[in-house]
Image (spheres, rainbow, N blue to C red):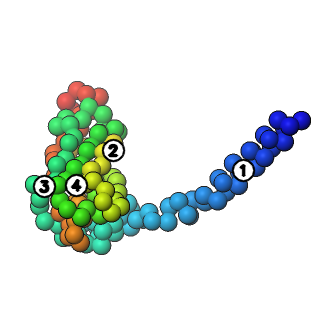
Amino acid sequence: MMNMKRRTMLKGALIASAAALTPQAVLAAWPKEGFGAKSVPEALMGTLGSDSTSPSDAIKIKAPDIAENGAVVPVTVSTTLADVTSISILASANPSPLAASFDLGAGAAGFVSTRIKMGKTGDIVAVVKSGGSLHSNRKGVKVTIGGCGG
């Protein structure tokens, strides 16, 4: 009898906490214009409010030169720039180039690592917002079909 009451209480608590996390609350900061954009400048405007970036060697992109599976391309972006507030990753040849955008808290290291989808060969563009300015770097990645070099 005691186990049934406990299970009912736990089940009710789980349902209540799941209901509190509605999709609107979870996705409130989602940059819809950025992810819906069809070009890199549009994606940057929709996500970061500007498409003006300055090239920076202080941004390092670690990604394979040749990706045998474009559906899961590992990408790591790191930077030595100070006061980093966001890092965005774009695949320039994709129909919707914005692959990921990360807002970083105060004191966070300028480092993100993820996997992105690339439809075809193109550049991975990393854009770092630091001190209110946008800085970028790019790395070319060849996407093969089935690992055959096509």
SS type, badge 1: helix
Crowd tier of the residue under label 3, counting other residues whose Cα lies within 10 Å: few below 14, some 14–19, many 20 or above:
some
The residue where tag 3 is placed is: 58
User: What separation in Å lies between label 2 and label 3 (alpha carbons)?
Assistant: 19 Å
Q: Amino acid at mark 3?
A: Ala
SS type, badge 3: loop
Quadrant of the rendered structure where residue 150 is?
top left
Q: Amino acid at mark 4?
A: Ala
Q: Amino acid at mark 2?
A: Thr
The residue where tag 1 is placed is: 13
- The residue that appears at 26% across and 31% down in the rendered structure is 68
Q: Residue furthest right?
A: 1
The residue where tag 2 is placed is: 114
Q: Is residue 140 left or right of residue 17?
A: left
User: What separation in Å lies between label 1 and label 2 (alpha carbons)?
Assistant: 33 Å
The residue where tag 4 is placed is: 126
- The residue that appears at 23% across and 72% down in the rendered structure is 132
Crowd tier of the residue under label 4, counting other residues whose Cα lies within 10 Å: few below 14, some 14–19, many 20 or above:
many
Which quadrant, please, contains the N terminus? Answer: top right
Question: Relative to the observer, which residue lies in front, 138 or 70?
Answer: 138
Question: Relative to the observer, which residue lies in front, 31 or 128?
Answer: 128
